[in-house]
Image (cartoon, helix red, strand yellow):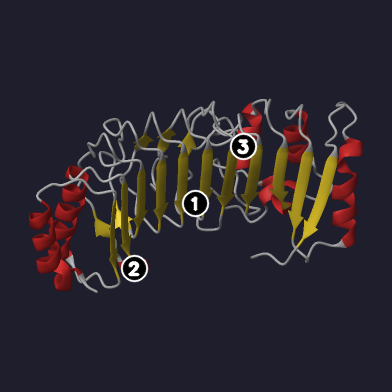
Amino acid sequence: MSVEELRSLVNHLFVLRRGSPMDTCELTFGVFTGRDDVPHVNLWFREAVMCKAQVLRLCVHGDFSFDTWLELDNLPLVSQHLTRLELVGARVHSSFLDFSSCPALEYLEMECCELSSVKKIVSESLKHLSIDDSVCCSDSRIRIYTPKLVSLRLEYLRERTPLLERMPSLVEAFVKIDGECTDCCKGANYETCDCKTCDSSDSMADGGSNCVLLKGVSEAKNLALISKSKMFIFRRDLRWCPMFQKLKTLLLNEYWCVPDDFRALTCILEHSPVLEKLTLQLPQRFTFYKCSTAILLPCRISKSSIHPSEMFLFCAETET
């Protein structure tokens, strides 16, 4: 149903409730007709917060290539009761994602959202964060400050990769840098590039002399790092590679298995002293020579006694 078709019903429903507490509020729209709908959805959203909702879900289906995100008010949420927030198809701003006034919030999921004006995501209580298929800033990095985070998932993010602050409680993290990300080398030959932005250059892109991702996920016990070959963030982060003191299981893709150059993979293994299981997820287009070299890699780290007790090679047809 469209927002217009629901206006009278939902407005009347909130009047009848008279602010009585609710456990869950879910607003799902199959059709988003335009800007006239925005004030109504924002009003319902705030009404649900005032009704002490513990779970809030807002889902807008649409073709987001035509700017059909629903824009939420640039005001912070204030709730002592909200524990879970899920957003699909929303445009949000920095003030909205400052959860300093939501001390019970533990789950935040954003999918197909527009975050281009967001400068930071702040929460002292958040434990689970997932951002999928969303648009980030094009000229700066979103800083994510969530010191109590336990699980993190970043996948299919467009524009610039967010910068992760330290997460000492992190247990598992999945980070996938896809082709829509703009943190990529523009040179025709990546290995000899001097484009002044990638890891082959002495100049640093935004992020300065700090790790963008690896420092933030360095406390994880289970970690997956997936990237397209021309993306430079992981390789550049290795210049300041932190120790992965708690890391037990590690999943990597072919980005880390460049033929005849295993420096990136060697570096991360040397900084993972208690690693027990390494899984390399390689596409079927890899030749047998590449696969064999990757399998033998741990034995070739001559300066380190670090050897995973288990190593798996998983070849599957993956996206190109």
Viewer-side residue, 231 vs 97 = 97
Report helix, strand or loop for mark 1: loop
Number of numbered markers = 3
Q: Is residue 265 above or below residue 231?
A: above
| Residue 213: quadrant of the picture | top right
**Residue at 30%, 30% in the rendered image:** 100
Label 1 and label 2: CA atoms lie apart by: 26 Å
The residue positioned 56% from the left and 55% from the top of the image is 178
Q: Earlier in the sequence, mark 1 or mark 2?
A: 2
Tell me the residue at 55%/58% (across/down). Answer: 179
Question: Label 3 sits on what residue type?
Answer: Arg
Amino acid at the residue labelled 2: His
Percent position of residue 158, x then y = 46, 54
User: Does residue 301 appear in this view?
Assistant: yes
User: Which residue is the site of mark 3?
Assistant: 236
Kindly identify the amino acid type of the residue bearing the numbered disc 1: Thr
Q: Is residue 109 left or right of residue 67?
A: right
Q: Nearer the viewer, residue 287 or 123?
A: 123
Q: Which residue is the site of mark 2? A: 61
Disc number for residue 182: 1
Give the residue at x 19% y 68%: 3
**The one of 176 and 137 positioned closer to us in this rendering:** 176
